[in-house]
Image (spheres, rainbow, N blue to C red):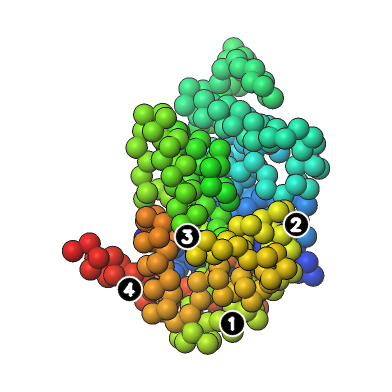
Amino acid sequence: MRVGAYLMPCHPPERPIAEGHRIDVDQLELLERAGCAEAWLGEHFTARWAPGPAPDLLIAQAFSRTSSIRLGPLGQLPCHHPIESAYRAAYLDHLGGGRYQFGVASGALPTDRQVFGVDRVPGLHRAMTFDALDTIVRLWTYGPEGRRGRFWAADVPDESLSPLGHFLMPMQRPHPPIALAAMRADSAHHRRAGAGGHLPVSLTVTPDNRYLARHFATVAAGAAEAGRVADRGDWRIVRDVYVADTDAEARHRARTGAMGRCWEQFLLPLYLRMGLAPLLGRLPNGRTVDPDRIDLDFVAERLWLTGSPDTVAEQLADLCRETGGFGTLLLNVHDFGDELPAWRHSVDLLTTEVLPRVHARESVGAR
């Protein structure tokens, strides 16, 4: 199991945007120093708690201050012309020396879809996403071509207008790694990830790991339909994790710090309004908790992975066993700007003490 991160990025509304941006870059540097292999950045336009309309700007700055961590957006393709997205991604791939990764989302926030006018027809944003992805991959693979998709058109530049013409391709060939994210089992995004040989990312909003296992079943089904075999090592799972020297300290810091505030004031109310209560309240024993009982204490106890290194190692071992195994744990990163030393200690404990315990358990179980 490898460790990476997912930054929405989340900041309390009173945090100045420029200050939040600086905190994000600092946290990406910290994650690299701790040995994290990759980080993905969300893209949101209408969330005061997640002011991230331009993840490529943050990625470009972070590339100049890091040397090994892979970076990329989980960007909303319905919001951008695919030719523009392809060229900007190719440029960033060169800025990062081949460390860029291209994440795909179709817009989880209804207000984002509304402001771009792609929320009027059910499923339109998803169809736009897949059409855009086809256009981007074809440009990276074959170069410009005359193509009129359902939503966008593309053409071949006139090469006779020397020295103008197409030249910018990604540093990684045929293209950077591509990831598709989803929250629900049976997602078309994960089916598409399997069919295309892309990286599936699961944004976890349920305590039921057996339900989470169905995410990869969808990936595998998509791969089989395309004549492929899905690799569990490609699967990324996003979880909230906080490790401290003792269980009590970890739970207190998570509950009263940036993680708890973000969930209480932003994520939990948002998810409930989005109709995700059946997932949030889904328990491993098959019961479902009533929405009015899903509060921060419920989330902290049921959904987060918190505790001492031994406790979190046991929780991660359970997650591996109950999902069938996965390749990368992505830490759900919050605005830890006011508590960076404690959070740094948490990440260090995770990478230096928790993961070796998990790997040791896996080795014993494999004998």
Q: Earlier in the sequence, mark 4 or mark 2?
A: 2
- Do we see residue 56 in this rendering? yes
Quadrant of the rendered image containing residue 194: top left
Q: Amino acid at mark 1?
A: Arg
Q: Earlier in the sequence, mark 2 or mark 1?
A: 1
Q: Residues within 10 Å of mark 3 (few under 14, many from 20)?
A: many
Quadrant of the rendered image containing residue 187: top right
Spatial CA span between label 1 and label 4: 23 Å
Name the residue tied to disc 4: 357
- Mark 4 or 3: in front is 3
Q: Earlier in the sequence, mark 1 or mark 3?
A: 3
Name the residue tied to disc 3: 209
- Mark 4 or 2: in front is 2
Against 39, residue 312 (above or below) is below
Label of residue 273 in the image: 2
Q: Quick one: SS at disc 2?
A: helix
Q: Quick one: SS at disc 1?
A: helix
Question: In the picture, which quadrant includes the N terminus?
Answer: bottom left
